[in-house]
Amino acid sequence: MLLKTLRRIAVSCLLATSSAAFAADPDASLKMPFPAPVAMTEGMADLGNVKLWYWDTGGPGEAVVLLHAGSGSSEFYPYQQPVLAKAGYRVISYSRRNQYKSEAGSDLDTFFAADDLLHLMDFLKVDRFHAVGNALGGYFGLDTAISKPERLRSLVLASSMMGIVEPDYTKAMSALRPKAFEELPLDVQEIGPSYRAANPAGLAEWNARHERAAKRAPARLHNKFTWEALGKLKTPVLLMTGDADLWIPPYMLRQVAARIPGSQIVLVPEAGHNIHWEQPDAFNEAVLKFIRGK
């Protein structure tokens, strides 16, 4: 039954560069400069128990909230902010507790990150939104989809292991990352080899922003992510990973997709654990195509 389900999953592989650009420079997609940002509001959102740093492009369009990875912050979306805003969306991101410019708060040992997300949306007067979660950010998007599905228009889980607690899944994931893996530099763990070789300047900037992100807070969740829980999801879900992602390779992502009714998959060539940074055109194209249909 599972095999039949897997066979029915539609898998898309995206290369965002045009054929002409690819012929002129086959590595152009790995060397993209940051586009000019659009105007946005920046500030500290006082949520009572914590103040979080955020930015918001504003506007009347549907809100898209970018949820950063554990190694990141609200600084990690220079490629997404202008593209999504110019497509007509209100684009928002924020740094979770203890990370770039955000405070730890008075309840650091007891808070839930999904609650912070929803309290920030209330602060910004956003009712329903598209959540785009990268890596650890996907955990909190998924937690919200289970606890408060009425708040989400859609959910993108990009390069996220999702915190699934099923024994078969956790065993396979542990086998992918032996102890020696943990001793590798973080950029080797998270950035694909093609990007590291082709774009040393981009890699240096990624590392600099990671250093500024500082210490992350505990990742507490309201829900346990079981196959049963995933099977009950009502929010439309897009799953993405890079073909060089050492954290959740395509094979493992297909196992998850088989458990989420109606989910879609996009596999991005020559990308590691940071698709939005390494292959931003492919990432943006996939996200826009998905949320436009929701």
Image: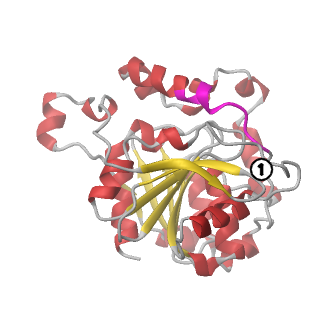
- Residue 169 visible in the displayed image: yes
Chosen colour scheme: secondary structure
Q: Is residue 15 left or right of residue 176?
A: left
Q: Position of residue 201 (x, y in %)?
A: 39, 19
Q: Is residue 65 above or below residue 60?
A: above
Against 229, is 168 above or below? above
- Residue that label 1 marks: 219
Total tally of numbered discs in the picture: 1
Image quadrant assignment for residue 151: bottom right
Q: Residues within 10 Å of mark 1 (few under 14, many from 20)?
A: some
Q: Say if the magenta span includes residue 17.
A: no
- What range is drawn magenta here? 209-217
Q: In the rendered structure, which amino acid carries the disc numbered 1?
A: Ala
| Residue drawn 49% across the image and 39% down it | 76
Name the residue rendered at 54%, 67% in the picture: 6
Residue 63: horizontal and vertical position, in percent?
44, 67
Q: Is 288 left or right of 223, judged from the image as shown? A: left
Residue placed furthest toward the right: 109
Q: Quadrant of residue 102?
A: top right
The N terminus lies in quadrant:
bottom right
* Image spot of residue 236 (x, y percent): 51, 75
Instruction: Give the residue drawn at x 64%, y 61%.
Output: 117
Instruction: Identify the residue shown where x is 37% and y is 22%.
Output: 199
Between residue 81 and residue 236, name the one nearer to us.
Answer: 81
Residue 237 seen in the figure: no
Left or right for 234, reference 40: right
Q: Position of residue 65 (x, y in %)?
A: 50, 59
When the figure is inspected, residue 193 is found, relative to residue 219, above or below; the finding is above
